[in-house]
Image (spheres, coloured by chain):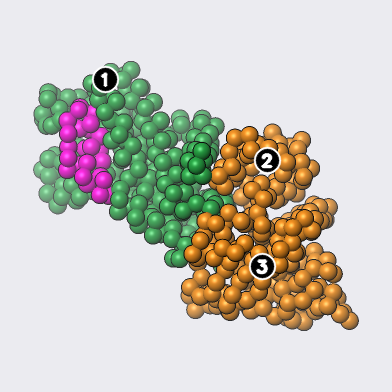
Chain colours: A orange, B green
Amino acid sequence: MTLSVESLSFAYGPRKALDGLTFTLAPGSFTALLGPNGAGKSTLFSLLTRLFVAPQGRIAIAGHDLTRAPLKALAALGCVFQQPTLDLDLTTRRNLLYYAALHGLTGPAARASADEALATLSLADRADTPARSLSGGQRRRVELARALIHRPAVLLLDEPTVGLDAASRRTITDHAHALARQGTTVLWATHLTDEVAPTDRCLILHRGRLLADAPAATLAEGSTLTDRFLTLTGDPA
Amino acid sequence: MSRYLAALTAILHRELARFLGQKSRLVAALVRPLVWLLVFAAGFRAALGLSITPPYQTYITYETYILPGLLGMICLFNGMQSSLSLVYDREMGSMRLLLTAPLPRGWLLFAKLLAGTLISLLQCGVFLGIGYAWGIRPPLVGLVAVIPALLLVGLMLGALGLLLSSLIRQLENFAGVMNFVIFPMFFLSSALYPLWKMAEASPALANACALNPFTQGVELIRFSLYLTPNWPALGWTLLATAVFAAAALYGYDPARGFTRTKG
């Protein structure tokens, strides 16, 4: 398995944010992590990216235990955070090259990877544009291109379409699905059920616990995914 | 290039490019100590008589006395400014990008610390140049000898800034903490007046000044400028740097999780 989470628990003081979470993701799969606000999605992402460490449970990325071999595990991970993380004063390409260097890629190899990633996301003509001048959708695409520059085995996307228009949302969801077909393991956190394709595997997270784990079409049987999600979580989608 | 060096170079390059791209930041950083040097010192020259104390071998002007203190002031403000930018980076998310890089967190924080210190050094260089043109002229060799001292003091104050940034969760809280750190550190030090003069007014205050790591840093700069060893100041500055850096590293420990925010 490319990503494995075992009995993961985490609390902010007395409030449990994750409670015994267990799941695995197969190579080249697209999985939607659905949950209402406050379900524990961002906490899970913070633990997967080792922004903080859970006192209980185990995470393995591409076969590397995140506690015992954090650097190898993080090297196999790409992440698009919920918060914008572009340096607005730098150009698109320089943003990518900075990230590449943090992952040990420099010189011509880094430039080639950056240009390739930008071309894949139709941003080649924006390479020398300061990030500040890009639209919201373009900035998100740049963040996605940046997360791919070191060819990670696992790609995490934490509500990457928040605040974007329909066309930009479609572009980014389609690209994430294409990446999964090409072999990248994608975990896509969202609270928007319309971003989930019927064939996508769905993990429904609520109050730190996994309520459901099945393909979206199976979950939605006889109803819609939105209705099923609302029934399970009792929250508006 | 090793992964470590690649990341260090990238972080240094990014921080320097950002600093040089903000001309107003350089001007703002220099205006403060220049006002003290060119206006305040001129006004107080007559009021504050100074006796001959090491490392000076003759009577000196007040401007000459406060020059090392103002270099310390540049490092202090820059250290706090870097800390402020870390809090901002954390709120804005770019800190996440840095901390999730596949490198030891200590190394990534050291790179940030070094970048901030080099910016302090750059500002100090320009300030010393202006001071030299104004007629405040330490020995030329002293201008070289002071570089490692400034580097160490910059690291110490940067590490303090790093520590503060690990404790402050919101940008709004920063201004208050700055008032509790910058002003006491600067005024309870030998930057503007020698400790013996402070002791005349209050021995307790003079003791507090002597315990202040900023005083030790300023004295290290002062003695280095005049090519005189000051081992106690060096020792205290090294110790304070190590303590602040270790505490900052603890503050940023993922197991402790200062970055925790509700999610």
Label 1 crowd bin: few (<14), some (14–19), many (20+), radius 10 Å: few
Q: Is residue A187 magenta?
A: no
Q: Amino acid at mark 1?
A: Leu
Q: Residue at x 23, y 21 (%)?
A: B139
Q: Earlier in the sequence, mark 2 or mark 3?
A: 3
Q: Residue at x 59, y 45 (%)?
A: A99
Residue type of the residue flagged with mark 3: Met
Q: Residue, x 72% and y 58% (percent of image)? A: A184
Answer few, some or many: residues within 10 Å of disc 3's Cα (few below 14, many 20 plus, some between 14 and 19). few
Q: Which mark is residue B140?
A: 1
Kindly report the distance in space between the C-alpha atoms of the residues bearing marks 1 and 3.
64 Å
Which secondary structure, mark 3?
A: loop
Left or right, residue A108 beside residue B134: right
Q: Nearer the viewer, residue A81 or B169?
A: A81
The answer to whether one can see residue B66 in this image is no
> Which residues fall within the magenta stretch?
B217-240
Q: Residue A16: where, in percent of width, then height?
A: 55, 77
Dot in front, 1 or 3? 3
Q: Nearer the viewer, residue B159 or A1?
A: A1
How far separated are the C-alphas under marks 2 and 1? 46 Å
Q: Amino acid at mark 2?
A: Ala
Q: Tell me which secondary structure the magenta stretch mostly adopts.
A: helix
Answer yes or no: is residue A58 visible. Answer: yes
Tag 2 residue: A114
Q: Quadrant of residue A24?
A: bottom right
The residues tagged by marks 2 and 3 sit, at their Cα atoms, a distance apart of: 28 Å
